[in-house]
Structures are given as structure tokens and as C-alpha cells.
Image (cartoon, helix red, strand yellow):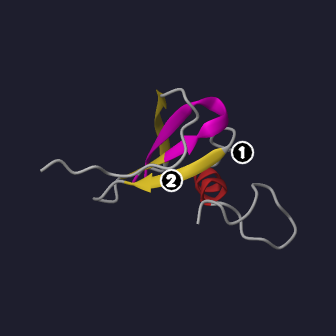
Amino acid sequence: MAHLGQDGDRSGHLPSCAAVIAMLLGTEKLGSGAAGILMDPDGSRAFVACSGDNYIVVIDLKKLEDVRHLDVGGIPDGMAWAIQP
């Protein structure tokens, strides 16, 4: 769903998930090139990869606040949980 339209697109396309989260947070945007979104398994946080800025935004979904930026470099995109046996 993160790739279902462009932020600010007024052509009738659905906005991206990153654009919807930014609207909920009351900000224009989270960062440039928001490409991937991952939800915490317990539903408490969302992680948004901002590829153009080389960081991941951590969002507290209960408070609807941007709580942290993780500088990761290397153009973050898709994310997934890795479970160790």
C-alpha cells in the first residue's frame, strides 16, 4: 500500500501510507521518498523508511507522534521482521 500514489497527488489516486500517517501526525511529510512502512507486531509503533533522507522514522501509534529518527544510510526501503530461532 505504500506505493499506491504520490504524496500530494490530486488526480484521484489514493495517497501513500506515508502521506496518510503524516496527515495524522499533523505534518506536511515525514521525510523525502517515504518508501516502506513496517508495523510493530503489537501495533504500538510504525517504522517509515525515508529513502531520500537515509533514515527511518519511528512513530508512536498510540500518541500519533514522531518519536525517533534512525540514521541508517544506504537508502532504506522495504523492511521486515527477522525472528531468530
Q: Quadrant of residue 27?
A: top right
Identify residue type, mark 1.
Glu
Q: For the magenta stretch, what is the residue range?
A: 48-62
Q: Position of residue 57 (x, y in %)?
A: 51, 39
Which is more toward the observer, 14 or 20? 14
- Could you tell which of marks 1 and 2 lies nearer the N-terminus? 1
* Vertical position of residue 45 compared to residue 70: above or below: below
* Vertical position of residue 54 compared to residue 10: above or below: above
Q: Which mark is residue 28?
A: 1
Q: Quadrant of residue 62?
A: bottom left
Q: What kind of secondary structure does the magenta stretch mostly adopt?
A: strand
Residue drawn 63% across the image and 46% down it: 34
Residue placed furthest toward the right? 11
Q: Residue 56 in magenta?
A: yes
Which is more toward the observer, 32 or 63? 32
Q: Residues within 10 Å of mark 2 (few under 14, many from 20)?
A: many
Residue drawn 49% across the image and 31% down it: 69
Q: Position of residue 85 (x, y in %)?
A: 12, 50
**CA distance separating discs 1 and 2:** 17 Å
Circle 2 sits in a helix, a strand or a loop, which is it?
strand
Q: Position of residue 83 (x, y in %)?
A: 22, 51
Q: Which residue is mark 2?
A: 37
Residue drawn 68% across the image and 43% down it: 33
Q: Is residue 44 toward the left or the right of residue 22 in the image?
A: left
Q: Residue 70 in magenta?
A: no
Q: Quadrant of the N terminus?
A: bottom right
* Vertical position of residue 24 compared to residue 47: above or below: below
Identify residue type, mark 2.
Ile
Q: Position of residue 23 (x, y in %)?
A: 65, 54
Which is more toward the observer, 24 or 31? 31
Determine whether label 1 and label 2 are within 8 Å by CB.
Answer: no
